[in-house]
Amino acid sequence: MYEILFALTLIFVLAAGLLLVAAQQDLPVIPFYLLAGVLAGFAIDETQLLDLAQWGIAFLVFLFGVHVDLEAFRSTGRVSATVGAVQASLVGTLLFGLGLLFDLDVLNAVYLGIAAALSSSLVAKSYLDADDAVRPTYERLAESIHFTEDILGVLVVLGLSTFVYAQTATAQQYAVAGVMVALALTIRYVVFHRLTARLQGDAEVMMLLGISILIGFIAMAEAAGLSIVVGAFAAGITIADDYPHSLELVDTVDDLEDFFTPIFFVTVGALLAIPTLETVGYTLALVVAVLVVNPLLVAFILLRSGFDGRTSILAGLTLDQVSAFSLFIAIEALGAGTIARPVFDAIVLAAAITMIVATYTGRHAGSINRLLRERGVVSILGEPLGERTHVTEGLTGHVIVIDFQHGGQQVLEACSHLDRPLLVIEDNPVLFEEVRDQCDNYVYGDVLNDRVWDLAQLDDAAAVVSLAPEYDRARRIGTLDADVPRFVRVDTTNAAEELLELGATGIVYPDAIAAERVGDDLEALLTEEISHEEFVDRSQSYYDRL
């Protein structure tokens, strides 16, 4: 017990000290976590580090499971499952073959292939779990792909359990894991919302409920001879964060992230070792596979599935880190003595490198997308454009609407009243059928593509209205080289000021619009211009339009 307390104290003291430097310089925190781990590694025994890393991974997997939107997964599930399965299979097979060429035995080549194949990013989780309900297509798609890869990770853990947990046959373990997942889904959809409604948001009881669910599923996994990460994953999908009374529970669960995130990243840094030439070779292969091959392969598959270049590239960039499942498998294998030390060190080193790079790509994904487009990478991959376009010949004086999902219906109604033609630019193939059914003129594609604006006949348009919630798309609208009024959506006042300076004609600021509308309706109610029933009807009509 003393050793664990000493290790935790040292981890948090070192992390806190280095994070002060990161905060003062506005630098990403993950490199400093890893540096703290390197320093902590000199004083903490490796066995303790491995135990801490396992628990850190298990809790982070649990947290990801809590925020997975299973309903959104249904809408993109087939595409996500295809992307995840194809990417993992191709890259895993490639690195497995490369491992054999490196003269590794079959099992160690499998470990190398798994590390490259499972590449969902913990760094990407910071924006995939954004509180904003208005989420762009690539975020929802990326979360679904991550969920698919996590399912694959659970299956791989079970598949390799013969080498780690020899007490139980693999077939029995799969059966028990299936029962646990079925139980988790039953609790989520049958019991959870009723239970949380009865608790009425009591924070203390909700916290105990969440911890009890987590510990209970981990205990079931341990009793069945399964890995704790399987129990943590099942516990995560048990908790639904889409019910009003579950907010306190989700907030409590999120607080655990602040505790276990430093433990995970610091222990990864502490497990780093001085690499041998053999380790460097394995690491280089993993880094190229995860940072280059995986994002481009995912982007290629999404493009061929009908998504536009921007959505495909941004979703692919979230898969540029060695997965927590890969690290967990490597740690379990090291404890069982089934993985060669150079391969283990390579997986840890590749994880650290890709974590640092993923921090950069997460911050600058929009810039990277523009750079790849300028270099012709998107064109080489094959961006779909033109075959999903219908524009009336000689169309003029039309209003161009970007992103039909987030308010385009209201703009369509306004244009209909004014007898003004409307053209929609949409990049979500899931919504494209709705756009085609309701609109006479439409262009499927990415607003960062100049060809899209040629097809939309920008120079002959009366106005451009961008309802997209992403800043880089709004910035593109604001900087269009055309003498056409442009209105862009923003979520912050700083973004509004910058876009107005860049050339945007007007700003759509939802918070301000909502506040003004509520103020007008409330004033009308208090001055008895409208009745209470009319006030209620107005509020209901706003909700019905969402």
Image: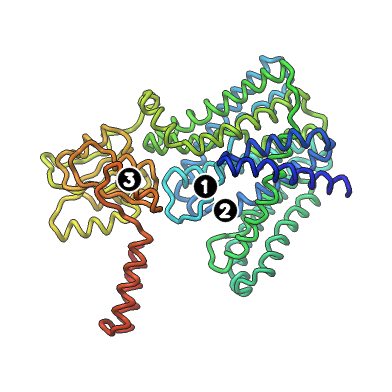
Earlier sequence position, callout 1 versus callout 3: 1
Q: Residues within 10 Å of mark 1 (few under 14, many from 20)?
A: many
Give the side of residue 195 with respect to residue 510, left or right. right
Cα–Cα span, label 2 and label 3? 32 Å
- Residue 6: x and y in percent read 84, 46
**Residue in view at x 62 percent, y 21 percent:** 285
Tell me whether circle 1 and circle 3 mark residues in contact (CB < 8 Å). Answer: no
Cα–Cα span, label 1 and label 3? 25 Å
Q: Residues within 10 Å of mark 3 (few under 14, many from 20)?
A: many
**Residue in view at x 66 percent, y 23 percent:** 283
How many numbered marks, from 0 up? 3
- Residue 347: x and y in percent read 69, 28
Residue for badge 1: 128
- Which three-letter amino acid code belongs to the residue tagged 3? Leu
Earlier sequence position, callout 2 versus callout 3: 2
Tell me whether circle 2 and circle 1 mark residues in contact (CB < 8 Å). Answer: yes
Q: Of 488 and 415, which appears nearest the observer?
A: 488
- Which three-letter amino acid code belongs to the residue tagged 1? Leu
- Residue 90: x and y in percent read 55, 27
